[in-house]
Image (tube, rainbow, N blue to C red):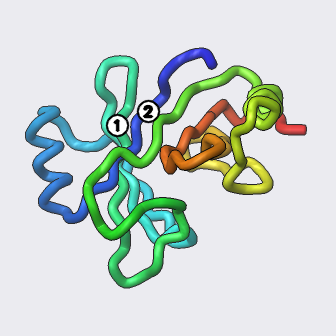
Amino acid sequence: MEALDHIGIVVNSSEEILLWEKLLGRSPFHVEERLEEGIKSYLFQVGSTRIELIQQDIERESKLPFLGENKEKIHHVAFYVEELSKECERLKEIGFIPLCDNPYSTSLGMEGMAFLPAGESKFVIEIVSFSNKKFT
């Protein structure tokens, strides 16, 4: 893993997003409504790292694993990797369980995969890479 890419935090309301804007002194640089996942994502740049606030759509059931019962919490930590396919294989070999069959794309031109550690932990690890590096 090359670097920390972002931390995903579940929030319950638009008011909490405004609180983060005040805390960080800026608006999100990217907002993405992901209808298929039942969420809206707000990305803030903080130094070389990003914070992703994840707000569930109360009208739709979220398909993201372990969002929970609308409680604020850290949902995932994402790491940037140069070669997504190699890191996916490495994580599988050491016992991490993929949460999807294939990489997914983001509107920021990246692709990613999410994993759970084996055992009781429900902390999601996401790895991301730029899409121009083809997954095989």
Marks 2,1: beta carbons within 8 A: yes
**Quick one: 95 or 7, which is closer to the camera?**
95
Residue 134 position in % (x across, y down): 83, 35
Horizontal and vertical percent position of residue 81: 65, 23
Q: Does 105 appear above or below 136?
A: below
Q: Which residue is mark 2?
A: 6
Residue 21 lies, with reference to residue 71, above or below; the image says above
Check disc 1 and report the residue beneath it: 51
| Most foreground residue, 74 or 57 | 74
**Neighbour class for label 2 at 10 Å: few (<14), some, many (≥20)?**
many
The percent position of residue 62, horizontal first and vertical second, equals: 48, 71
Q: Residue furthest bottom?
A: 59
Which of the labelled discs sits on residue 85, or is there none?
none
Q: Could you tell which of marks 2 and 1 lies nearer the N-terminus?
A: 2
Please tell me which residue is depicted at 71% across the width and 46% down the height of the picture.
Answer: 97
The amino acid at mark 1 is Ile
Seen in the image, is 47 located left or right of residue 84? Answer: left
Q: Amino acid at mark 2?
A: His
How many numbered discs, if any? 2
Residue 136 image offset from top left, x and y in percent: 90, 38
Tell me if residue 61 comes above or below residue 50 in the rendering.
Answer: below
**Residue 133 in sight from this viewpoint:** no
Residue drawn at the location 33% of the way across and 69% of the way down:
69
Closer to the camera, 94 or 31?
94
The residue at the point 43 percent across, 81 percent down is 60
The part of the image, by quadrant, that contains residue 89 is top right
Residue 63 at least partly seen: yes
The quadrant the N terminus occupies is top right
State how far apart marks 2 and 1 are (Cα). 5 Å
Q: Residues within 10 Å of mark 1 (few under 14, many from 20)?
A: many
Furthest-right residue in this view = 136
- Residue at 31% over, 37% down: 44
